[in-house]
Image (cartoon, rainbow, N blue to C red):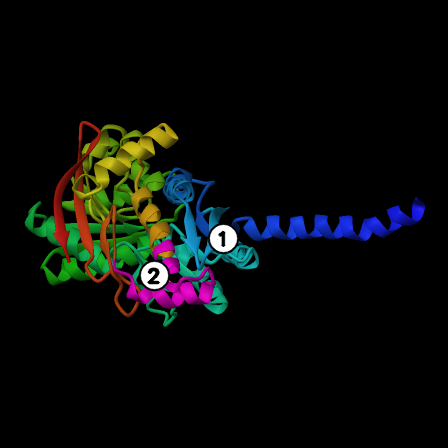
């Protein structure tokens, strides 16, 4: 009896092993897509909005079912916080590489995207930024850097052109927050402003953690410009506009997409109505799929879109589109398909040029009326 039991055990073990093997074979392949943005600090609301857009796309794709090369695939969002800090950005970029993500959607800020981009380039992982606008991001010679928004080389000129022709501005003071984004946008604005004949009275620098701008604004008040261009994010741009109003400056405040958010009205108070800002992408209300996406986002997260969620949403779908065309979940094969992207999504048709920029960038211009962000114009570049 003991002998028979001994003889049966190997057969039983073989059955268990075979069943386990078959279960593993049938199990979905887990494929990680990274997302990085500031989830702490002054821009955390924007980072979370971006993450939500990516998460919504991944949840939808998983619910529909995804099969690549005959294997069922489950996508997993590997979400990281770079706190909008360049050094932290490189650390989390390396973590995503170590986590074996097949692509990265991020980072939000140019000052984070640029240093992190070398990490992804060295690893051969595609990086699609939904919101980094500094031209330098895609001018480093890397084959891995892409973005789904226009650049400051388009945004700065569009804002300057509107100031000169739409607002009849003759003189301007410029302030930037010393980040790659704020400084880059301010410099592009300044070049075009001068070419249009605007008088640039001054160009001052602050930092992205500043809360008190009264010294700079008092100096600018003495210069009496028609407008002040501020290069920075809404966390500092809101107080900047509010303090300008408190000091009695008559000048319009001009700003880029970092300031041009739904939260500006809370950050600037009544002074938001003195702001004219640009967004490096199509306005949500002008996107063919904008209304439907907005409703889905509101239902899933319980609040409206803040800013760039449609761009992260499409970026995830662009990665999956490349995955399908490659018929592979291998990062190198996905990367190889990205240059041939011709994807029609919420934000419109996305196709990239040789640098990784959009072939057809769009700039939207806004002001605020009674605290409500209101579309002024859409400029196709």
Residue 146 tag number: 2
Kindly check if marks 1 and 2 are in contact, taking CB atoms under 8 A apart as contact.
Answer: no
Q: Which residue is mark 1?
A: 31
Which mark is first along the chain, 2 or 1?
Answer: 1
Residue 11 appears left or right of 248: right
Residue 59 appears left or right of 183: right
Report if residue 179 is visible in the image: no
Q: What residue lies at 71% left-to-right and 52% top-to-bottom? A: 17
Report if residue 352 is visible in the image: yes
Q: How many marks?
A: 2
Q: What residue lies at 39% left-to-right and 70% top-to-bottom? A: 142
Query: How dense is the environment of label 1, judged by Cα within 10 Å: few (below 14), some, or many (20 and up)?
Result: some
**Residue 170: horizontal and vertical position, in percent?**
9, 51
**Residue 281: horizontal and vertical position, in percent?**
23, 50
Residue 194 appears left or right of 246: left
Q: Secondary structure at mark 1?
A: strand
Q: Main secondary structure of the magenta part?
A: helix
**Residue 232: horizontal and vertical position, in percent?**
32, 47
In the image, which residues are magenta?
320-342
Q: What residue lies at 18% left-to-right and 39% top-to-bottom? A: 285
Q: Secondary structure at mark 2?
A: strand
Q: Nearer the viewer, residue 361 or 184?
A: 361
Q: What residue lies at 24% left-to-right and 36% top-to-bottom? A: 292
Q: Nearer the viewer, residue 146 or 255?
A: 146
Q: Quadrant of the C terminus?
A: bottom left
């Amino acid at each position: 009896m003991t002998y028979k039991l001994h003889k049966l055990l190997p057969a039983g073990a073989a059955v268990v092993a075979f069943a386990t093997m078959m279960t593993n074979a049938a199990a979905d392949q887990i494929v990680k897509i990274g997302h990085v943005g500031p989830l702490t600090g002054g821009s955390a609301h924007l980072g979370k909005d971006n993450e939500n857009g990516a998460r919504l796309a991944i949840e939808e794709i998983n619910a529909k079912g995804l099969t690549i090369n005959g294997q069922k695939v489950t996508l997993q969002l590997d979400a990281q916080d770079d706190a909008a800090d360049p050094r932290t950005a490189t650390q989390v970029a390396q973590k995503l590489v170590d986590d074996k993500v097949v692509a990265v959607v991020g980072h939000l800020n140019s000052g984070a995207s640029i240093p992190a981009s070398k990490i992804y380039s060295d690893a051969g992982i595609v990086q699609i930024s939904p919101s980094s606008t500094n031209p330098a991001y895609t001018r480093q010679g890397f084959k891995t850097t892409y973005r789904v928004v226009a650049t400051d080389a388009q945004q700065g000129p569009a804002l300057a052109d509107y100031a000169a022709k739409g607002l009849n501005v003759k003189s301007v003071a410029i302030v930037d927050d010393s980040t790659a984004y704020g400084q880059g946008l301010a410099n592009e604005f300044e070049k075009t402003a001068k070419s249009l004949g605007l008088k640039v009275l001054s160009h001052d620098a602050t930092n992205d953690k500043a809360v008190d701008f009264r010294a700079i604004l008092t100096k600018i008040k003495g210069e009496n410009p028609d407008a002040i261009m501020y290069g920075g994010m809404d966390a500092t741009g809101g107080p900047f506009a509010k303090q300008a109003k408190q000091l009695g400056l008559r000048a319009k405040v001009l700003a880029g997409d970092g300031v041009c958010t739904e939260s500006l009205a809370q950050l600037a108070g009544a002074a938001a109505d003195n702001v004219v800002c640009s967004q490096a992408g199509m306005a949500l209300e002008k996107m063919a799929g904008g209304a439907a996406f907005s409703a889905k986002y509101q239902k899933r997260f319980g609040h409206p879109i803040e800013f760039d969620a449609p761009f992260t949403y499409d970026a995830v779908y662009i990665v999956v589109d490349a995955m399908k065309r490659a018929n592979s979940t291998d990062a190198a094969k996905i990367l190889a398909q990205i240059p041939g992207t011709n994807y029609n999504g919420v934000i419109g048709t996305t196709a990239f040029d040789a640098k990784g920029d959009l072939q057809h960038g769009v700039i939207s211009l806004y002001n605020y009326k009674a605290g409500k962000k209101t579309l002024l114009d859409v400029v196709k570049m």
